[in-house]
Image (cartoon, rainbow, N blue to C red):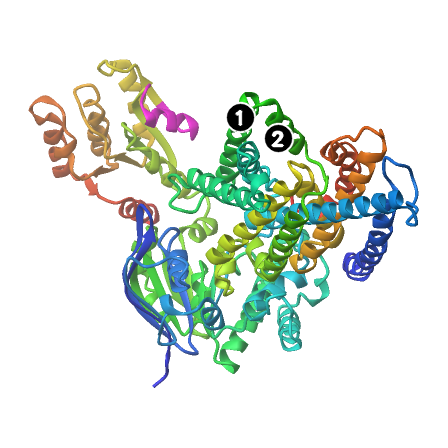
Amino acid sequence: MTENALTFRDVSAGYKHRKVLDRVSFSLQAGEFVSLIGPNGSGKSTLLKTAAAFIKPHGGRVELFGRDVARLAPRERAALLGIVPQKLESPMAFTVEQIVTNGRVASMGLLGSVSSGDCDLVERAMIYTDVLGMRDRFFGELSGGEQQRVALAMVLAQEPKLIMLDESISHLDINHRNEVLQILLKLNREEQLTILLVSHDLSLSAAISDRLLLMQDGALKAAGIPQDVLRADLLSSVYNCDLQVRQDPYTGALQVSGPLEGQQRSPKTGCRVHVIAGGGSGIELFRRLLLEGHRVTAGVLNLLDSDAEAARALNIESVFDQPFSPIATATLEKAKRLSREADAVIVSHVPFGTGNLVNLDLAAEALKLGRRVYIATGIAGRDYTSGKQATAKVESLMKAGAVCWESLHELLAALHEQKTH
Amino acid sequence: MCADNRFTEKKPSLPRLRLVLFLLAVPLLLLVSLMLGPSGVGFPDLSTPVGNAIASLRFSRMLMGLMTGAALAASGVVFQALLRNPLAEPYVLGVSGGAGLGATISILAGASLALPLSLPVIAFVSAVLTLMLVYGIASQGSGGQPSVYSLILSGVIVSAICSSIIMFLVSTASVDGMHNVIWWMLGSLQPASIAQQQFSALLITAGIAGTWALSSRLNALVLGREMAHYQGVNAGLVIVVGLLFSTLLAATAVSLSGMIGFVGLIVPHVMRASFGPDHRSLLPLAALGGGVFLVICDAVARTILAPIEIPVGVVTALVGGPFFLLILQRRMKQAWIA
């Protein structure tokens, strides 16, 4: 049985006022190549910091090669685990070689004397990462990708048995990214180096990793071989957008593609939609609809409303009315002109009062004209009219064929379907 | 390709040449300082008792200058590394102010006359207390690890408070005490008692040796506390020990020669710009550079308006300032990425 390089047992960790990791348990076997994926802010960096005992866990236990990381001397820990940061920053003008030499700091004598063995390690790390030619250049003068390779060289010089890379390769050009990955794969194969790669490139992670770990909101959502983790439904819910996973019939490689690819392939095929919003319920809706390539109109919006601001800022054709008064008939007519031209009318999670109740008539008319109408669920909780008139109206709309929607993801999928039919 | 060659071929030879020139200049400058004094330019005649006395006075002032300058410069190097900031130095962090306040109290209380070694000890203790106060204020609400900016801000504030307390004490002191304190505050390399000199030499040697032993860890810390941690450096310990050593250096310098500004800030910058930021070589070089710089400034201070002696702090800033600014303007990029 192979040894575990890293084990998290029920680890909770975070910062003073914010808990990030919530009872995370997993282990990496020695010699494995694992990618850690997950949306921004899901706790990937915190997990790395906790593994290196830079953050002390509130609960649970972290083990490096079977030993409690909290009890390892700094020097022993550095011999087991090296971390390549997202970005290495040096306020002072160190040369590349001086930076890489830092990787040996734990084994240096008191006066910083470097043994010849250490020198060889530094040299070898620079050759591996192709930075030897720039050894006397100032680190700060290098490009972002070159700096990343220097950072990797520094960690390689440290000679750890487990290397974690915190999105370190995302800034590299395609040539150097492949080179760095080849170095990592080679070290992984030939020297049994365990590697944990934090990455946002899901397809690439799937191609190179033995296993994937998927994080969401500080918890481990899934772990396993790429085929088990890269499932469209799982990814779509974790990343909160519409993702597809395709498998290349020849190579078996998994390709994750998002809504952007679809849009680029078929531009300007979006629907024309009219949005009934208010009270800030429309901002995210506008943004996502525009991103999907739909043509958006809105109204009637109250002039002081944050949705009115957003509509103006996003250049959305809208109809406005004065605040604190019922919507004027003339204004409603203008809005009707917009909604008649739309392929679909969307009612957001907007609260209804006597003032904006007539907006629902727009939806009713559209439905009569054979347009699709999408209404956000939970109208009863947003109905502030006397006698629950809005709820009644919505119910009759639903009977007449309106569709209800809950999450943006759902709504966008429905629109997509409508578009293709 | 072209750019690569330019960088890889030319760079190494220049610092080496600069290093040789610097090391040759040090003994020469020290000799020059022995030739300067209010009694005239040139080596004193050692065959006469007067000449002998002048020579020994100039020699002991040279030693005072070397010790004080080395301590201030080394202390500045360490503060700048630990805080990763070019503004950091003993004055900015309130360490010198705290040491000065302690020294003032001990001078006014007469303790320094009774016990010759009490001055450096009290200066060190009050400097450490001040540093702890600054650190404590800066850590408020930041969860134990203060940002550099809040450290510098609270350092400047505490420093201002210390100097106003010093002024208050001086204004209410007797004429004698006032004279002693003001003369000491202006900063001078008048030789202290032999016992104090020996004790200070011991502390400064220990301080420089201690910080030098940390130098490879300081290099790692410049890349940030987190990165240093990942590389197997006990970052917290190195920071505390480094702060204690550099505070010891600054406090000893202050107790020995008073408030001499500028050396702790500018000498580290110039040496870093000239020889690179690797602390393993920077620390000893900065100590040497600071010592020689102060010795020369003192020689100028006692000679230029002889028999009047101007405070050495005036010379360090007036003469050293423009000179160093010139160097820094041209070479700052080799020291800090700004």
Q: Amino acid at mark 2?
A: Val
Q: Nearer the viewer, residue A153 or A326?
A: A153
| Any part of residue A263 in sight | yes
Check the image and report above or below for A376 versus A258: above
- Report if the CB atoms under discs 1 and 2 are less than 8 Å apart: yes
Quadrant of the frame with the N terminus of chain A: bottom left
Check the image and report above or below for A74 versus B168: below
Locate residue B211 relative to residue A26 in the image: left or right: right
- The residue located at (82%, 60%) in the rendering is B13
Check the image and report above or below for A185 versus B227: below
For mark 1, what is the residue? Answer: B169
Query: What span is colored magenta in the figure?
Result: A303-318
Please give the chain letter of the residue carrying mark 1: B
| Any part of residue B334 in sight | no
What distance separates the C-alpha of mark 1 from that of mark 2?
A: 10 Å
| A363 in magenta | no
User: How many residues crowd mark 1 within 10 Å: few (<14), some (14–19), many (20+)?
Assistant: some
| A310 in magenta | yes
How many numbered discs, if any?
A: 2
- The residue located at (60%, 52%) in the rendering is A90
Q: Nearer the viewer, residue A351 or A167?
A: A167
For mark 2, what is the residue? Answer: B181
Locate residue B52 relative to residue B194 in the image: left or right: right
The spot of residue A268 in percent (x, y) is 45, 42
The spot of residue A42 in percent (x, y) is 35, 54
